[in-house]
Amino acid sequence: MDSIPIITVENLSKVYPVAIKQPGLKGTLTHFFRRTYRSVPAVQSISCQIDAGEMVGFLGANGAGKTTTLKMLTGLIHPSSGRVTVAGHDPFRREPAFLEKITLVMGQKQQLIWDLPTLDSLRINAAVYGIGDREFRQRVGELSEMLLLGDKLNQPVRKLSLGERMKAEFLAALIHRPKVLFLDEPTLGLDVNAQVSVREFLREYNQRYQATILLTSHYMADITALCKRVLVIREGQLIYDGGLDSLLERFSPSREVTVELGEGRSSQQLQTYGELVSVEGCVARFIVPQEKLTQTLSRILADLAIVDLKVSEPPIEEVIGQVFRAGAT
């Protein structure tokens, strides 16, 4: 049985008019009385479909158009052109039935009231969504258990750690049990342990409630841990839509070779074996094209006194950075 798309995007675009102002007093007066504008495209003709229950990573450099796209998918801003449906609704109409099915979590924003206990903010959210007391207690119990927050809900939000506060934000955003989650940098600023905890929660939430998740993050560990499929946006254009593994294979036609040397060599000598990434003490890292790997390894073993040697894929951050810079073809 074919999966049913829960998000459909067709030729979605957003263009912002930006006022042009010349320097000096004359420019200021002209700008005040007769303002002129130029058009700045933020998103350009994006099309994609996301099936119910999918967890999809949404990647792009700063300013690529990720947040603008999420805001159009959630109805916060109106597209300049194109068509969007989310869970059978036009997002910009902001119908109550639509809002009950989605949530937007932004790592740099908060909805909890700073000086009140988390539980009080949750009660407000429950009242907004018309959730009864019994159902409220059940949902808070389930989510707080998944988030390991049970003993923190009665503390003022300002006394929670950053990681605990982010978990509480998730609890507040999910109290109405949405089927579509739009997550914009949800682990921003969190330490490694808190990031892992948030990822485990999202994985469990997806499995338990079959929720659809569209996730943006600059922490590639979030994407690799949760998403098999990724969308890559560059300068407002969708340049890749497919499996994460396929993306890495396409844009990583090289291998990273790490060698520990028994005797020192100059950086100039080491550069003859490939692109020298770093030299730290007796450990050197190279990037070697796949087609030259066997030949290069033979040369290294013949020329150098090797204590240890390792061949691996380049770090995913480097591969994705290459995609952002070059674009997909």
Image (cartoon, rainbow, N blue to C red):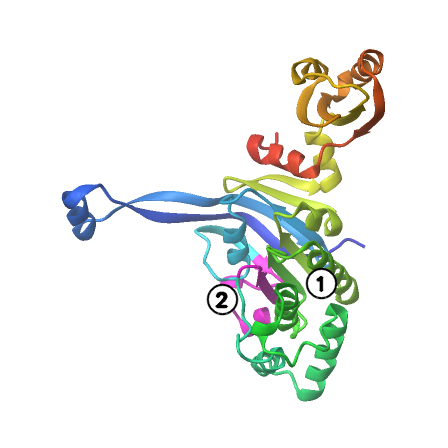
For marks 2 and 1, the one nearer the N-term is 2
Q: Quadrant of the N terminus?
A: bottom right
117 with respect to 250 (left or right): left
Q: Quadrant of the C terminus?
A: top right
Quarter occupied by residue 243: top right
Q: Which residue is mark 2?
A: 93
Q: Which residue is mark 1?
A: 211
Q: Residues within 10 Å of mark 1 (few under 14, many from 20)?
A: many
Badge 2 amino acid? Arg
120 with respect to 259 (left or right): left
Q: Is residue 59 visible?
A: yes
Seen at 65% across and 14% down, the residue is: 268
Quarter occupied by residue 104: bottom right
Check if residue 136 falls in the magenta segment.
no
Q: Is residue 101 visible?
A: no
Badge 1 amino acid? Ala
Place of residue 326 in the rendered image (x, y in percent of width and height, measured from the top left): 57, 30
